[in-house]
Amino acid sequence: MNEFPVVLVINCGSSSIKFSVLDASDCEVLMSGIADGINSENAFLSVNGGEPAPLAHHSYEGALKGNCI
């Protein structure tokens, strides 16, 4: 049995991936972020509203892996 169940929500668009991790018991947002500018030289990842970090690989695969420079 999972002692701390969470829900992962992913929304993929044409040039971005938005995600949230929610506490399954009360839907409180534990973490959220965005990878934007996918397939461009300006691709970045930002978590919890933090400073954007450039993605080392500008593809969807790179964004999902969170490969930052």
Image (cartoon, rainbow, N blue to C red):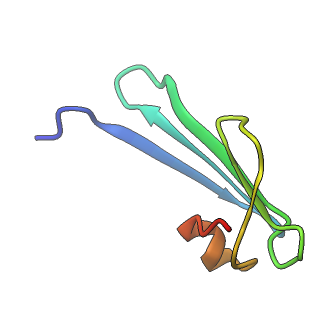
Quadrant in which the N terminus appears: top left
Q: In the displayed orientation, state which residue is furthest to the front.
A: 69
Quadrant in which the C terminus appears: bottom right
Q: Nearer the viewer, residue 40 or 12?
A: 40
Q: Nearer the viewer, residue 67 or 10?
A: 67
**How many tags in the picture?**
0
Q: Residue at the spot x=70%, y=79% of the render?
A: 57
Q: In this rendering, is residue 68 above or below 47?
A: below
Q: Residue at the spot x=66%, y=45% of the render?
A: 33
Q: In this rendering, is residue 47 above or below 30?
A: below
Q: Residue at the spot x=72%, y=68% of the render?
A: 55
Q: Residue at the spot x=80%, y=71% of the render?
A: 38
Q: Position of residue 68 (x, y in %)?
A: 65, 65
In the visual, does 6 lie left or right of 31? left
Q: Nearer the viewer, residue 51 or 8?
A: 51
Q: In the displayed orientation, state which residue is furthest to the right.
A: 41
Q: Tell me where residue 40 sits by quadrant.
A: bottom right
Q: In the displayed orientation, state which residue is furthest to the left.
A: 1
Q: In this rendering, is residue 32 above or below 15?
A: above
